[in-house]
Image: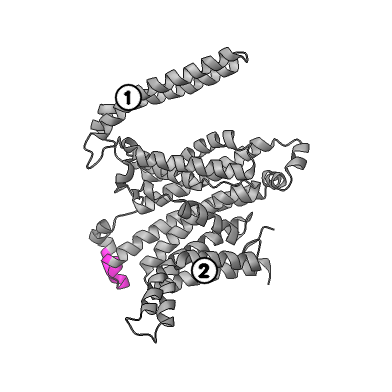
Amino acid sequence: MSYTVKNTALFTIIMLLLVFVGFSQSWNVALQIINLCLISSIMALGVNIQWGYAGLFNVGIMGSAALGGLAVVLISTDPEPEAIKAGGLGVVLSLLLGIATISGAIFAYKRLPKSRMRTIVVLTIVVVGFFVTRAIFGPATDAIEQVNPARAGNIGGLGLPVLLAWPVGGLFAGIVSWGIGKIALGLRSDYLAIATLGISEIIVAVLKHEDWMTRGVKNISGLKRPVPYEVDLQAAPWFLDLCKTLGTDPVTFSSIFVKLCYAILFGIVLLLILWMSEKALNSPWGRMMRAIRDNEEAAAAMGKDIKARHLQVFIIGSVVVGIAGAMLTTLDGQLTPSAYQPLRFTFLIWVMVIVGGSGNNWGSVLGGFVIWFFWIEAEPMGLWLMDTITAGMAEDNPLRIHLIKSAAHMRLMTMGLILLLVLRFSPKGLIPEK
């Protein structure tokens, strides 16, 4: 079987499985799975850029996704005038003081000769700057959180269209990844993994505890949409005429229509990122990155700046994950900081890249669809399997009850089984790197 025929067959199989879900369960479920598959594929592309192109073992994916979600809140939500009046100036002032403190410490470190005096000056700038900043920042945020805490308790956003938050989410993730890269990219791969995981946990902890910005664990719901609302569609004459023509129920079809609009938007973003990723991979830059990945010493001997190129590709991959994180928060319609868990936003994304084929962009897309499909459908398939196995048992049989209850835990076993089978029979992934 040729390379093209095999890849086409794999994508066809997963599409047929999604169509089967549409007929057997509902098209609402199928489209919801498709939307999450599209977002997961974009995240997998971001990780593949870092790992597949350059061999960077980043397990801080969760942090980049969370920053994308934060961008949706800061860009699309309406501002809270009372909260801004109560503590907005203090927050801005403390931010400027923090930047000035860091800049002053760096300036002193570079300008002063190496001595004990330099150490004392730098430490003095940092300590004094920290306490002055905290003295302004603390009262300002307390004042913001006391303004209508039941409904808001945060400073709000800019009130701009939510689509603008997607590139801004990538920008946030890129800026933070630049800082992480400057610190951690010189570390060995296992230490890099530990550093990125720790920093991503810090980012999520900030989202959970800085109520003035994200409402913390109280969550922010009702975020703006880039697509119509179901209620508005059900009242629109053109939509009612369309439902009459198709012979469908307006309530059910409005939900399907909204999910279809999301799928079109997400599909456009995925195709655009995939196209740019393929262009980059097949360019001289992509060949240079693969050469650095395969043999850093030889690439360095040819005059390549390894650390600069690693930083570059680390930022690009994080930007892609940040965009996907903003898209996911937009789809959910709310920011839930406690939902950012390593299992969902690190482990599963890495499984997608490994199963799909590390170093191959199309493989990452396929891995995103395959893994997310089985992650969602493992439970209903497990329930069907247990019902079939225990069909001859009595309803109150303890073994039957135990097996049916255990169907909810089929997800992790299914992921492990898929990963083992792929690594055994196709070690380089379903669509290996050429």
Taken as a whole, is the magenta stretch helix, strand or loop? Answer: helix
Pick the residue in front: 136 or 324.
136
Q: Are marks 1 and 2 in contact (CB under 8 Å)?
A: no
Q: Between tags 1 and 2, which lies in front?
A: 1
Q: Which residue is mark 1?
A: 90
User: Which label is found at residue 14?
Assistant: 2
Q: Residue at x 72, y 37 (%)?
A: 304
Q: Nearer the viewer, residue 209 or 84?
A: 209
Taking the magenta stretch, the answer to whether it contains residue 241 is yes
Percent coordinates x, y for residue 409 in the rendering: 43, 66
Pinpoint residue 204: horizontal percent, then vertical percent: 42, 43
Which amino acid is tagged 1?
Gly
Percent from the top left, x then y, of residue 182?
A: 58, 33
Q: Amino acid at mark 2?
A: Ile
Q: Nearer the viewer, residue 340 or 326?
A: 340
Q: Quadrant of residue 22?
A: bottom left
Please report the residue visible at 50 percent of the width from the left and 36 percent of the height from the top: 176
> Horizontal placement of 3 versus 273: left or right?
right
Which stretch did the figure color magenta? 240-251
Outermost residue, bottom side = 392
What number is the disc on residue 304?
none
**In the rendered image, which quarter is residue 1 located in?**
bottom right
- Residue 168 in sight from this viewpoint: no
